[in-house]
Amino acid sequence: MDETKQPVAEQANEQLPDLNNFYGYLPGGMYRDDDKGKNKQAIMDAIDQIIIERGNGDEIKKANSLIEESKKFMAEMFLLLQQGKTEQAQLIEKKRNDMAKEAETIIRPLYNELIKRGFSHDLLMQ
C-alpha cells in the first residue's frame, strides 16, 4: 500500500503521531518565513486551501495562541525545576499539557485531511 494512502494510525504503528513539527506549517508558524522549497510550499498551500474551505481560520488562530502560550509555560516550568520548586513546576506542566491537547484537537483534523489528500506523514513532519 502506498504510504500516502495509509490510515493515520497504520502509519504511526497504531499510535497517533505527534504533531510538534507540523505546527510550523500553520499560518504564523515558523516555516512560513523559511526558504520554503517546493514540498513545504505545497503543504502550506494545501493548509491554506483547507482553512478557506472549512472557514476555520479563527480556530487555527486559537491553536497558534495555545501553542505559543504552552511554550511560555514550558520555559517557566524548567525555571521552577532549576529552583527546586517541583510542585509548582508540576502544576505548570499540567496547564501546558492541557493547552497542548486543546491545540491538537483543533489541528489534528487538518493533519488528517492532508493525509487524505496524499501528503505522507514523513513529509508533514519535516
Image (cartoon, helix red, strand yellow):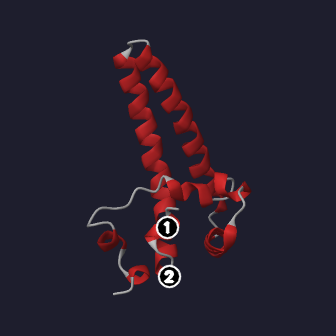
Query: Residue beneath label 1, please?
Result: 111
Please name the amino acid that badge 2 sits on.
Gly
Residue 33: image x %, image y %?
73, 55
**In the image, farthest residue toward the bottom:** 1
Q: Is residue 19 above or below residue 13?
A: above
Image location (x, y in percent) of residue 35: 72, 61
Q: Residue at x 60, y 49 (%)?
A: 64
Question: Which element is circle 1 on?
Answer: helix
Q: Nearer the viewer, residue 13 or 93?
A: 13
Q: Few, some or many C-alpha atoms within 10 Å of disc 2 (few <14, some 14-19, many ≥20)?
A: few
The residue that mark 2 highlights is 118
Residue 24 lies, in percent from the top left, at 60, 55
Disc number for residue 59: none
Could you say where residue 52 lies in the image, as x and y percent from the top left?
68, 72
Identified at 55% across, 45% down, the residue is 67
Q: Quadrant of residue 105?
A: bottom left
Amino acid type of disc 1? Answer: Tyr
Cα separation, mark 1 vs mark 2, equals 11 Å
Q: Secondary structure at mark 2?
A: loop
The quadrant of the rendering that contains the N terminus is: bottom left
Q: Residue furthest left?
A: 14
Residue 2 seen in the figure: yes
Is 95 placed left or right of 34 in the picture? left
